[in-house]
């Protein structure tokens, strides 16, 4: 029998479709015959959240309640080992979830970011982003001058005093770094910079990176030619390379005049009004400035803890937190709670990026001290940038018995718990604490509160963990570089408060019981 022509050959689908075949015909793209979807694997859950006007993203969940159960496939130890190896391989190949990017401009000079603990923020053009959680975020306040009541930590203050010996001038030939002032989009007060650099902080880089973000987020590109060869950033870098302090000051003066003019004639307000949410790079820039002026100088305080206890410190980085906000659908009308909030990074990010009412509770003294410093600087720096933020509440104490946190949990839409180092007893107490959550509240954790394989049965119907419905349809990975304690990707988990499933289960049991004869 003669072989079939090439145009008639059949090729199996290599991506797991059962019974699917692809016919290749001359001059046409392959067409697939779709297999009908399994209705049980594609079942989605609808969540009733009265305080939110916008629904959550659709997600796949296993059937629950009175749905027809799926048959469980028991895994052998070899199956589990293969899955573990596959997960590790995927983690190693996952893209790094960080905004730290090397500048392709050769003029950059390869300088490092303001803090070795946090990735450097780089400005990008404000490409369209999802409008979920959008809000009017730009405020203009022209009336604040440096009268001593505006408690901003200027860069010059950060590099002076007892810390002055850690820095050297950015321009050769000067005994101490010359000072300049930089205008921001918000208040009329300008930030003072001493042109010095050290191992953890470079004022020159802080200046041109800040200018880059202002141009990208508050000014039309044509007004300052922000992305062409004569941009403010490039001119500053060239002046620095030429050791021309006069040219450097001239560029700063021109930039300040441009910003002041754009504020007064409404240009900045018009540009910001067209953007319904802050760009993530701008979010990280503001958070980096707050962190570098408050936490970085005393970062050793965060390392004073005892390993093996519940009080172990670790940070979740900003890009990872942004992914959590997006996945859980957090909006500016929501309440966010971070249990074990450390130095307050996540709480401040929720207030800045989303505009949410953000709460945190921490019991370790050193992180609490740094959190207070960050919260104060955050408020001042948000006004400097002209950004409207949500309320922040950073509390000291045990989140299991703090009354204010208890009240916040009753209103919470999203709760975050970095329980990576928590012991089983503490996790169990937290599940009991979650009894006060409202219906539809989402709980995010690094270890699951609902054990894998847990089933709602008559013998465990009173277990409070049954009120949490885990998102089982997809595995959530942070991407590499998302946390401070490892460069590898970490798993994270989401569960929704859903007491109705227990009620439905009890109703099903009751209907199945034989009636007693009178």
Image (cartoon, rainbow, N blue to C red):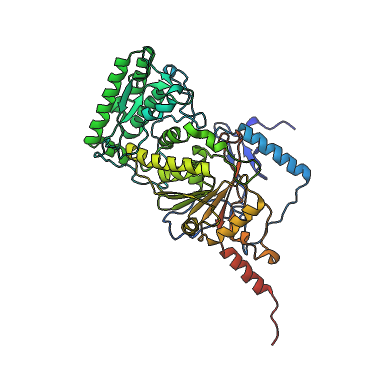
Q: 258 or 241: nearer the eye?
A: 241
Q: Looking at the image, can residue 9 be seen?
A: no
Name the residue at the front extreme. Answer: 162
Q: Quadrant of the N terminus?
A: top right
Seen at 39% across and 31% down, the residue is 125
Q: Quadrant of residue 376?
A: top left
Compare residues 166 and 58 and report the one nearer the observer. 166
Residue 165 placed where, x, y %? 44, 22
Q: Position of residue 413 (x, y in %)?
A: 48, 54
Residue 279: x, y in percent?
40, 37
From where the camera sits, is residue 24 visible?
A: yes
Relative side of 421 to 275, left or right:
right
Q: Is residue 463 left or right of residue 95?
A: right
Q: Residue 410 at x, y = what percent?
A: 49, 60
In this view, the residue farthest toward the bottom is 518
Q: Is residue 77 above or below residue 401?
A: above
Tell which of 463 and 391 is nearer to you.
391
Image quadrant where one finds the C terminus: bottom right
Q: Quadrant of residue 168?
A: top left
């Amino acid at each position: 029998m003669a072989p079939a022509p090439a145009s008639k050959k059949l090729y199996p689908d290599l991506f797991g479709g059962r019974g699917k075949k692809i016919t290749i015909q001359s001059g046409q793209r392959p067409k697939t015959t779709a297999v009908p979807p399994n209705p049980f694997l594609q079942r989605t859950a609808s969540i009733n959240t009265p305080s939110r006007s916008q629904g959550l993203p659709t997600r796949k969940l296993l059937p629950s309640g009175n749905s027809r159960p799926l048959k469980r496939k028991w895994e052998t130890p070899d199956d589990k080992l293969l899955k573990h190896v596959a997960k590790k391989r995927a983690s190693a190949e996952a893209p790094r979830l960080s905004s730290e990017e090397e500048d392709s401009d050769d003029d950059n000079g390869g300088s490092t970011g303001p803090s070795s603990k946090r990735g450097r923020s780089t400005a990008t053009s404000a490409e369209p982003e999802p409008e979920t959680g959008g809000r009017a975020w730009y405020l203009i306040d022209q009336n604040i001058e440096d009268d001593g009541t505006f408690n901003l930590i200027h860069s010059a203050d950060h590099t002076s005093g007892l810390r002055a010996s850690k820095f050297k001038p950015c321009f050769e030939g000067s005994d101490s770094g010359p000072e300049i002032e930089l205008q921001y989009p918000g208040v009329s007060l300008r930030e003072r910079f001493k042109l010095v650099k050290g191992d953890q902080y470079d004022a020159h880089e802080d200046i041109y990176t800040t200018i880059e973000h202002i141009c990208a987020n508050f000014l039309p590109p044509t007004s300052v030619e922000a992305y062409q060869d004569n941009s403010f950033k490039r001119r500053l870098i060239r002046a620095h390379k030429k050791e021309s302090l006069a040219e450097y000051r001239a560029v700063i003066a021109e930039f300040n005049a441009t910003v002041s003019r754009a504020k007064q004639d409404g240009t900045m307000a018009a540009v910001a009004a067209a953007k319904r949410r802050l760009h993530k790079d701008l979010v990280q820039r503001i958070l980096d400035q707050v962190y570098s002026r408050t936490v970085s100088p005393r970062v050793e305080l965060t390392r004073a803890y005892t390993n093996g206890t519940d009080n172990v410190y670790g940070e979740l980085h900003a890009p990872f937190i942004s992914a959590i906000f997006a996945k859980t659908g957090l909006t500016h009308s929501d309440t966010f709670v971070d249990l074990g909030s450390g130095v307050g990074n996540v709480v401040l990010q929720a207030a800045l990026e989303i505009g949410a009412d953000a709460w945190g509770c921490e019991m370790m003294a050193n992180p609490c001290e740094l959190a207070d410093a960050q919260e104060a600087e955050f408020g001042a720096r948000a006004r400097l940038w002209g950004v409207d933020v949500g309320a922040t509440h950073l509390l000291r104490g045990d989140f299991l018995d703090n009354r204010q946190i208890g009240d916040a949990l009753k209103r919470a839409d999203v709760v975050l718990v970095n329980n990576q180092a928590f012991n089983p007893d503490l996790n169990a107490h937290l599940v009991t604490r979650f009894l006060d959550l409202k219906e539809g509240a989402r709980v995010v954790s690094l270890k699951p509160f609902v054990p894998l394989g847990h089933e709602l049965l008559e013998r465990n119907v009173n277990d409070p963990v049954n009120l949490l419905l885990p998102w089982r349809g997809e595995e959530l990975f942070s991407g590499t570089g998302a946390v401070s304690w490892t460069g590898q990707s970490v798993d994270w988990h989401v569960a929704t408060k859903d007491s109705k499933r227990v009620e439905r289960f009890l109703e099903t049991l009751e209907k199945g019981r034989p009636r007693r004869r009178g």
